[in-house]
Image: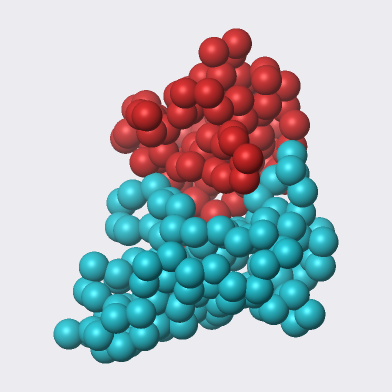
Chain colours: A cyan, B red
């Protein structure tokens, strides 16, 4: 079945860019998502990308997809202390199939 | 539109008891999924209901069960609680073109 991997920790300085990486194993994954979780809260959808896209930009967020390497990244420009949270990558093969989540990357933003 | 709501937000139970958690999806969403989140195991998929039928199921014992009603609201039940069932239980609803999942705030279950 699908397996999604992420590095567990990332630390950046306020104002710098953050890049969170994710790899997945199932090349048929059609939908790929990024979620953010703040302490004590549920998961907040940040953005998603379809497998027929290479890049998607949404304000400070840029998602890059390399289908050949099965690699997904989330870039946060001008990272702020409010961006400190756990970021989850998720993959879904097809409509109607369950989501598979990575372990989450804890982003710490230092002042 | 109102978001996904979960009740109760916090619950304390003792070993051997059973518990029922409730989830109300976003209006118009027909799919509801349940997840267990623990520090050690991360986010693990329990099951998904679509139009009152279980569509997908994760690898959890039969003590974990769920159901969905005709108004798409869903309940999850855990019987014979164990200490290891202490976790944040998250519900997500999905619908629309991208079929994206939107999460509720979760129910924090503590088993003593």
In the rendering, at what x and y percent does residue A8 appear?
A: 49, 77
Above or below: residue A88 compared with residue B26 = below
Residue found farthest to the left: A111
Q: Horizontally, is A41 left or right of B98 in the view?
A: left
Q: Nearer the viewer, residue B2 or B107?
A: B2
Give whichever of A73, A111 is nearer the camera.
A73
Can you say which quadrant of the picture contains the C terminus of chain B? Answer: top left
The answer to whether residue B99 is visible is yes
Q: Using the image, determine if residue A15 lies above or below residue B70.
A: below
Q: Position of residue B111 (x, y in %)?
A: 41, 39
Determine the image quadrant of residue B86. top left
- Which of the 4 image quarters holds residue A25? bottom right
When asked about the image quadrant of residue A48, the answer is bottom right
Q: Is residue A79 left or right of residue B54?
A: left
Q: Identify the residue at horizontal 39%, vertical 58% (top origin).
A: A37
Left or right: A86 as drawn, with respect to B45: left
Q: Position of residue A39 (x, y in %)?
A: 30, 57
Q: Residue at x 44, y 58 (%)?
A: A46
Q: From the viewer's perspective, is residue B23 above or below residue A96?
A: above
**Residue under the image location 69 percent in, 78 percent down:** A66
Which image quarter holds the N terminus of chain B? Answer: top left
In the image, B1 versus B63, the foreground residue is B1
Residue B82 in sight: no
| Image coordinates for residue B13, horizontal then vertical, percent | 39, 31
Count the labels in the image: 0
Residue at (70% x, 45% y) in the render? A98
């Amino acid at each position: 079945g699908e397996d999604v991997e992420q590095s567990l920790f990332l630390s950046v300085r306020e104002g710098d860019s953050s890049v969170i990486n994710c790899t997945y194993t199932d090349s048929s994954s059609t939908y790929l998502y990024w979620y953010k979780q703040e302490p004590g809260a549920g998961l907040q959808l940040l953005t998603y990308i379809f497998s027929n896209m290479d890049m998607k930009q949404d304000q400070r967020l840029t998602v890059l997809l390399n289908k050949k390497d099965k690699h997904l990244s989330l870039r946060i420009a001008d990272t702020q202390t409010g961006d400190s949270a756990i970021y989850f990558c998720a993959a879904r093969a097809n409509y109607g199939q369950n989501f598979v989540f990575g372990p989450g990357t804890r982003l710490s933003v230092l002042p | 539109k109102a978001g996904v709501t979960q009740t109760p937000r916090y619950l304390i139970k003792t070993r051997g008891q059973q518990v029922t958690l409730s989830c109300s999806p976003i209006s118009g969403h027909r799919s509801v999924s349940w997840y267990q989140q623990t520090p050690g195991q991360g986010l693990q998929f329990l099951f998904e209901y679509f139009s009152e039928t279980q569509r997908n199921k994760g690898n959890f014992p039969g003590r974990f069960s769920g159901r969905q009603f005709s108004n798409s609201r869903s309940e999850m039940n855990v019987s014979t609680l164990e200490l290891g069932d202490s976790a944040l239980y998250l519900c997500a609803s999905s619908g629309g073109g991208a079929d994206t999942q939107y999460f509720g705030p979760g129910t924090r279950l503590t088993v003593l």
